Amino acid sequence: MKSFVKSAKFRILLVFISFLVGIMIYGVTKGGYSLSGASLINMLTQPLKSVSNSVALEFERISDKIFSPDKYYEENQKLKERINELNRKLAEYDDLKAEVEELRKFADMKEEYPELDMSMPAEVLGYVTNDPFKSFTIDKGSADGIEPYSPVITSDGLVGMTVEVSEKSSTVRTILSPDLSVAAVASSTNADYGIIEGTVINSADGHTKMSHLSTAHKLKEGDLIVTAGNTGMFPKDYPIGTVISTDFEINGLSACAEIEPCCDITRLNTVFVITDFSGKKEGADESKTAP
Amino acid sequence: MRVKLPREKRIFYFKTVLRWIVYYIVIILLFSTMNAGTWTKPILLVPAALCIAMKNDLMASAFTGAVCGFLIDVACGRLFGYNAVLLTVFCVAVSLLFELYLRDKFINFFWINAIVSFIQCCLDFEFYYNIWKYDHTEMIFCGQTLKVWAYTVISSVFVYLFFRLVNSKLMPREHLTIKEIINNNRGITQFSKE
């Protein structure tokens, strides 16, 4: 022991400890700021610390899972049940909301057009595959009192006409089709009569065309076009669409207008079929309207 | 000719029934995809009917062609039976072609499907748009008919691969092929020499 105390190693050790104590005392005098060496070490070991910390946390999490699985399992089951319950309630709420909205529209329309007898809201089952004129199928048919060649509407405006009716479903031809002609008149003037008939070009944009207008017409952009109601096929004064632009026909003898339908015919969810209305032509000549 | 054992017969019947069930499930699924959305879609039932006609006998092919045709009529809002007649004729022709002249190769299916789809699309365009002399029907031909045809031809690759998979798993073979007989004989000869 005496030899160790007297040895050079011991002295070096003392010097080193003194150096460390000195550093410590110096650190105390810095008043809370770390020494530059400590900062450097901190900086260098920062990534290592973060990795080790995350590893430790992960380890703790795993060990926690291993040693207390029942607690987590029960909690998980409770949360799952809660989520399922909330999802069920949300789905029910969405259904009810949609139903209420439909029925509200239906009630509003009944109030607004008391002369129209309408079917219950019909859901659009799907559009006819690859049809450029957007014909579609609805979930109401002859069992619901729907007949062929009955007008089909939404709360916004005229959509088209039923052309093929089976017991539980019907096919609707829209006003975008060249095969459907509707007598129409400008709501503002009540004098500019014409025929609404779809064209290939207009149907691509979801628009239709009003043709056979007088060259002296007073139609302007934004004018509302409504059904004329003089053919007995459609109720009078029901909105069809608004004028986008007017032009002359190629023959120059009459004018035409591009019409944007009041409802987006390419994105329909629910429609109504008018089963009866005042002024309906009994046994209407089907061949004229449905080639 | 392979001698049929009762067990083999059972497997034969089971596989046949299962195969046709799978065929018709796929047909219904393809039909339901045709009714989804408002965008332009391929007529997937055409390649499906042809795939079935390639590997099956005449009557079954004709019947399947008719079913697929009826489904196309319903989905496309066409006169009920119009596509059924077309596809029945095409399926019978394809069944005969593959039975008598053509080998069961993808390239043969591909060009036959391309021709049949093109005829089906062109007839549809002619009878439902062009014949009524609408203005600008060429827009429908370019923007709709040719697009549907192209989609149908491209998607037929996947339909073919699926039916090939079904056939490879569920198509029971009643007879050995000549190649198999030769291979079997070789095996027997080698075994007897040893």
Image (cartoon, coloured by chain):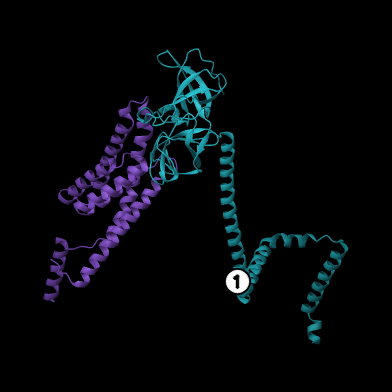
Chain colours: A cyan, B purple
- In the rendered view, tell whether residue A99 sits above or below residue A191: below
**Residue B189 vs residue A255, the one in the foreground:** A255
- In the rendered view, tell whether residue A252 sits above or below residue A94: above
Residue B15 on image: x %, y %: 27, 64
Residue A120 on image: x %, y %: 50, 43
Three-letter amino acid code at the position of disc 1: Tyr
Q: Residue at x 23, y 44 (%)?
A: B90
Q: Which residue is drawn at 56% across and 51% down?
A: A95
**Residue A255 vs residue A228, the one in the foreground:** A228
Residue A110 on image: x %, y %: 56, 38
- In the rendered view, tell whether residue A46 sits above or below residue A105: below
Relative to B65, is A136 on the left or the right?
right
Total marks in image: 1
Residue B120 on image: x %, y %: 28, 39
Quadrant of the rendered image containing residue A178: top left
**Residue B175 vs residue A91, the one in the foreground:** A91
**Chain letter of the residue beneath label 1 in the structure image:** A
Q: Can residue B46 be seen in this view?
A: no
Image quadrant occupied by the N terminus of chain A: bottom right
Q: Which residue is drawn at 37% across and 52% down?
A: B29
Q: Can residue B168 be seen in this view?
A: yes
Image quadrant occupied by the C terminus of chain A: top left
For mark 1, give the secondary structure. helix
According to the picture, the residue beneath numbered tag 1 turns out to be: A73
How crowded pointer 1 is (Cα within 10 Å; few <14, some 14-19, many 20+) is rated as few
